[in-house]
Amino acid sequence: MKVSVVVPVYNAATYLEQCLDSILAQTFTDFELLLVDDCSTDDSGQICDYYASNSQVRVVHLTERLGVSTARNIGVKNARGALIAFIDSDDFVAEDYLLALVTTLEDYQADLVFSEFNMLDQQAGMFYFNVKPEVKGQVHELTAEQAAAMPDEKLPFRHGCYVHPWGKLGKKELYLQNPFIPNLYFEDGPNSLRTFLGADKVVGLLVDNYTYRVNHSNNITQGPKILKGDMDILTAFRYRALDMLAAQVDPKSFLGELHHNLTQDAYALEQAKQTNSEEYREVQWLLKLGNYPSLK
């Protein structure tokens, strides 16, 4: 078994079948599909069991809700493949998605390959293509340090494709040695950085065979949720900064990303009428510390 495709599932019944059908339609066939049902309360669990009649599909049903990070970690531990690919349960992939990743990883003798993605915003009725035709198919070889220092304006990758756990194919041991941090929003940033730093060679592939579905379900007026997310994203950035410093990689590379997130957090907290919160004061302090203009 070469590849284990790990799909964490939680209340994804609306789009789950499209996701699973796209995976099972792959032209590359030496893979297993491992579904980790995180105690769903809709029909997701039954859908997973239906697909388990296919010999390529296995299902792990968790008996309590543990969160997407733990679901991914459990998937890795149960995986039989030497390589791991994560796909989110509301997204879908082109039929040559795995073939392109496996071929690139093997041709360049890399430990991890990441690719670009498209964005589907059904609420807005928009589909966004992120790879320009003139660069499609290009492969960029990176050292672990170069990958960890992204974003790099000299490289034609957009939309933080290097951050997300999906859109990648990596050696299983990278994920065993660098598990996702439980109970943390934006857990993908620290994990991606650590897997990059744990690799000897990383390659970036400019194809957009993965479609990410934009989720508008989060309401910016939900105060407690905003406070939790606001603090977690700052925690995730602290993890990344400390890891980069420990690896002697200049953390200045993501200051622009940090500024973007801080200003978004400030706006969300203002909309949620949380300007008297400790979280809002910390965001404003960090904006001032970095000499960033506040929204006020």
Image: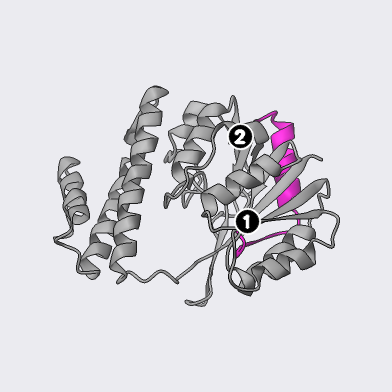
Say what amino acid the circle numbered 2 marks: Leu
The residue labelled by disc 1 is 62
Whether residue 95 is situated above or below residue 135 in the rendered picture = below
* Residue sitting at x 31%, y 46%: 234
Label 2, label 1: how far apart the Cα atoms are: 19 Å
Q: Is residue 3 left or right of residue 240?
A: right
Asked if the residue under mark 1 is in contact with the one under mark 2, i.e. CB atoms within 8 Å, the reply is: no
Residue 253: image location, x then y, percent: 36, 36
Q: Specify start and end residues of the magenta stretch as a single range.
A: 88-111
- Residue 189: name its quadrant: top left
Q: Is residue 143 visible?
A: no
Whether 133 is among the magenta residues is: no
Residue 141: image location, x then y, percent: 59, 31
Whether 105 is among the magenta residues is: yes
Whether residue 100 is situated above or below residue 210 in the rendered picture = above
Residue 236: image location, x then y, percent: 38, 43
Q: Which mark is residue 50?
A: none
Q: Is residue 132 visible?
A: yes
Say what amino acid the circle numbered 1 marks: Leu
Q: Secondary structure at mark 2?
A: helix
Q: Which mark is residue 176?
A: 2
* Residue sitting at x 60%, y 27%: 201
Front residue of this view, candidates 144 and 188: 188
Q: Secondary structure at mark 1?
A: loop
* Residue sitting at x 59%, y 44%: 73
- Residue 76: name its quadrant: top right
Task: Say how the picture is coloured.
Answer: one colour
Q: Within 10 angstroms of label 2, few (less than 14), some, or many (20 or more) residues?
A: some
Whether residue 195 is situated above or below residue 74 in the rendered picture = above
